[in-house]
Amino acid sequence: MQAKIHVTPDGVLSKIDDRLFSSFVEHMGRAVYTGIYEPGHPTADPDGFREDVRELVRPLGLAYIRYPGGNFVSGYNWRDGIGDKDKRPVRRDLAWFALEPNQVGVNEFVTWCRSVGSEPMMAVNLGTGTAKDAAELLEYCNVEGGTELSDLRRSHGYEKPHGIKLWCLGNEMDGPWQICGKTAEEYGRLAHETAKMMKWMDETVELVACGSSHRQMPTFGSWERTVLRHCYEDVEYLSLHSYYKDLDKDPYSFLSCGEQMDGFIKEVAQICREVKGELGSSKDIYLSFDEWNVWYHFRMDKQDPEKWIVARPIEEEEYNFLDALAVGCLINTLINNADTVKIACLAQLVNVLAPIMTVPGGPAWVETTYWPFLHACRYGRGDALSVEIGSPSYECSYGTVPYLSAAAVLSKSGDLVTLFLVNRNLEEDLRLQLDGLRGDITEWHTLEGFGLYDINTPESQKIAPSTRGACDISDITLPKASWNVIRVKLK
Ligand code: AHR
């Protein structure tokens, strides 16, 4: 089977915002407790954070890490997580039916986040919380000193302000599962008033308003319009969330997830343009795809763990090789929409729907999905190039889908083009004709040759990339069912 792509170094679609390579740590399951934080673990630092986890997070070079939720944030009082650890309250977390000991709060998280080279993307509680709570959290975090809350932070040992720039106005407020969910009218008004107070408190912050929880919500579209009509001028971004699944064991349909995500992005971007026109605004709203991933195995296979315990082990996915290919397709879609999507968070980072897993008291290890994400984080920075694909296609429940999924990035240095390619043909290799690029292939990383449903475990992480030997640019064959990162040094 043969396909071709046409890419040229001057065919720039958009600069890629580094924040496209971000992730998410929620107080959920074992993401925080026994995930990033486990005092007493052999690798724990004096603050209780696991160094072995850090060693797997750092190479990702994540721009931002979203925190503390997710659904958790809608019942969270940020004041519970500051001050002396032994005086902090233990509470029931009604989002995930766990006990929250509050041993990690905003100060500890910001310190950890920066220790892995990332910036925090904070969410404020707009479920049980108020505009005043949100503005006060911002005062605590970002005001230098001389006010009650900034001085309180200093008294907690954080002399310098945290300088947190990016904030989410709540989370999935349209969801009936959300603690104190809202109608679009209620949320739009609250987002507007909260944004006003937050920007008066610190005019440098950037804000993300909640879009629909996912494309299938009955209010999708009308929610975005109503919310934006209330707060268009107050926010910089609108959120999108989406998780993809292979419930029917129909891999070809599952691998159309990139096309599904593409359609969703384009619909939301169109709504933003329409509201802009309607309001006569001169400003553009960009998209924050702040939850994306594959999510489904856990719910199918596992019993619900005991409630009201700390570090309740929920949503610990076992990602297989097929899931890694799906993540590759989703990454390509994000890069190909870099003109509208400026922030994207793989949800999540550790233990919960995560590329990085831990054994309490034991090792940290990586799931299959770690690898395409690492490749994108490492090689996906620069300018997104337009890619014209000519590929045979297949029919699936989504419709007609090309076997080849592709994205191309011109490095910041301007002398390398990285191609991200998924051969979605699960039975046949794909010969690739590459038009428009002159140069030599200097690196080719691939995930290939595994069973679709093979997984990694703490004992064996056999699903890992291999490197292909030297190869001519005119002689590229993508193995069946494979993720490929091909780097071309331009002549
Ligand atoms: O990422 C897991 C959960 O998925 C988040 O808490 C919520 O926002 C979404 O429904």
Image (cartoon, rainbow, N blue to C red):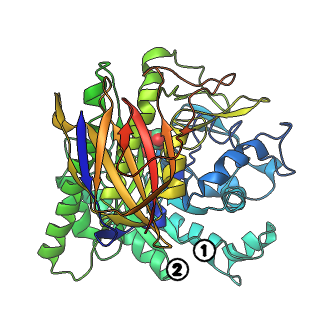
Quadrant of the image occupied by residue 159? bottom right
Q: Is residue 50 visible?
A: no
- Image quadrant for the C terminus? bottom left
Q: Name the residue under label 1.
A: 139
126 over 41 or under it: above or below = below
Image side of residue 130 versus residue 210, left or right: right
Q: Name the residue under label 2.
A: 201
274 over 295 or under it: above or below = below
Disc 1 residue lies near ligand 1 with CB under 8 A: no
Q: Are marks 1 and 2 in contact (CB under 8 Å)?
A: yes
Q: Which residue: 45% across, 35% down? A: 324
Question: In the image shown, does 39 or 293 lie closer to the viewer?
Answer: 293
Q: Position of residue 369 (x, y in %)?
A: 50, 37
Give the class, few, some or many, for how many residues have Cα within 10 Å of label 1's Cα (few <14, many ≥20): many
Comes first in the chain, label 1 or label 2 = 1
- Image quadrant for the N terminus? top left
Q: Where is residue 352 in the image (x, y as percent from the top left)?
A: 55, 35
Amino acid carrying label 1: it is: Glu
